[in-house]
Amino acid sequence: MEKRLSDRQVRAVAAADDVRHSYFVFADGRLWRTGAGTEQAEVVAEMPNVREAGEGTGDGRIEDRELEIRLYVHGPWVCVTERFGVNAALVDTTTGAVRELRREDYHSDVSSYSIGFLERDGQTLLLAQTAWNRLDVFDAWTGANLTEREVFNRDTGRSDERGFRVFESQNYIDYFHSLLHVSPDSRRFLSNGWAWSPVDFVNVFSTEAFLSGYEETGVSVSTAFGYNWDRPCAFIGDRTFVLALDEQGDGTDPYRQLAFFDIPETPSDELLEPNSLVDCEVFPRNQDGEVKGELHYDAESGCLVALTSDNGSSLVSLTGEIVSRMPDLNLASPPAHGDFGSSYSGSGGWSYAPKHRLFYRWVTGVGIEERLLPATV
């Protein structure tokens, strides 16, 4: 039975990737399905484990604060997450079946809940964070964990010749996973995370290598980063991705905003260097020289789609040229890492659906509003 969402707070919206003009929204602890230009929606599933306010996680900074809710869509599957919380739920939208998920709490209030979908040998797999430094791969249909293993880093009680304590570890890395990006062919993915002290850096993984060797198979990206994980990033091919870089140093060196990387066919222990750096000013820099926003790749035009919270959206060539500007299509303002647990999923902010080449947002009293990606000559 359809109901109107006009009197409900819509917390998150995501486009269905299999049907144009069809959308999933999260409101009142439920996942709903709706169409463009209407507030009528039908309930897909209830998710009592997904909270809308912080409770008992982190070090208390997000207690009772509104949590950002994020939706990840892949065919019939929708994964609903508390971005800076510990709970998530995987929904089979064809049956309404819900599988509850959870990650261990350690600085979850500043690290995004890591979620991605993979296609492998005819199976849909869910890549999900289960601890701050651990991802697991699950069969979406059965829930079977394909990467079950022991992870530890423990004090042996012994000291080395210099008097330092000796630890033994297995399948352990000192790295906080955050937002994930999956290659079009599902053979590679990257984690846009950070490590102490803290400093952000990107780890790149081969799916096949990860299934047997886990986190230790990752290759780190070699470029100057700072305190800005979850930076704009997008795959532009099965082995190529682009990152938006912050301005570094005293400004005497030339600043190039876009860095392009090619992932080698065979994983290596060496740092992954950029194969090209491109001048571009599509992302404004804040007072710390950091860039914020989202990047997507539009295969039809061969351009990047960049969304910012205060400079609108733009269509950008791979050489850094601004092909088209959409100054009124602002991304909802993303939280800085000092804005622990804050939400930017309210109305007014735009998102982008690459498969449909559409911008969209929820507007109370209207429903889903859509805008087409501008045509290119």
Image (cartoon, grey):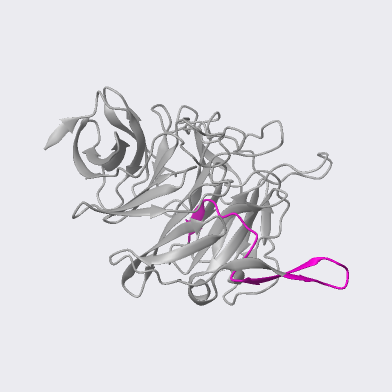
Q: Nearer the viewer, residue 337 or 348?
A: 337
Residue 175, relative to residue 24: is it above or below?
below
Is any part of residue 218 visible from this angle? no
Q: Nearer the viewer, residue 306 or 148?
A: 148
Residue 55, relative to residue 216: is it above or below?
above
Q: Is residue 159 magenta?
A: yes
Q: Identify the residue at horizontal 57%, vertical 32% (top origin).
A: 339
Q: Identify the residue at horizontal 36%, vertical 43% (top origin).
A: 50
Is any part of residue 46 visible from this angle? yes
Residue 165, relative to residue 348: is it above or below?
below
The x, y position of residue 103, in whole percent, is: 47, 53
Of all residues, the one furthest to the right in this rendering is 162
Left or right of residue 137, residue 123 in this image: left
The x, y position of residue 94, in whole percent, is: 19, 55
- From the image, which quarter does the C terminus lie in? top left
Q: Identify the residue at horizontal 41%, vertical 72% (top origin).
A: 146
| Quadrant of res 2 | top left
Report the span colored magenta. 157-182
| Quadrant of res 163 | bottom right
Of all residues, the one furthest to the front in this rendering is 157
Left or right of residue 289, residue 209 in this image: left
| Quadrant of res 47 | top left
The x, y position of residue 282, in whole percent, is: 59, 38
Q: How many marks?
A: 0
Q: Nearer the viewer, residue 270 or 88?
A: 88
Q: Is residue 123 magenta?
A: no
Residue 322, relative to residue 5: is it above or below?
below
Q: Nearer the viewer, residue 303 or 190?
A: 190
The x, y position of residue 122, in whole percent, is: 31, 72
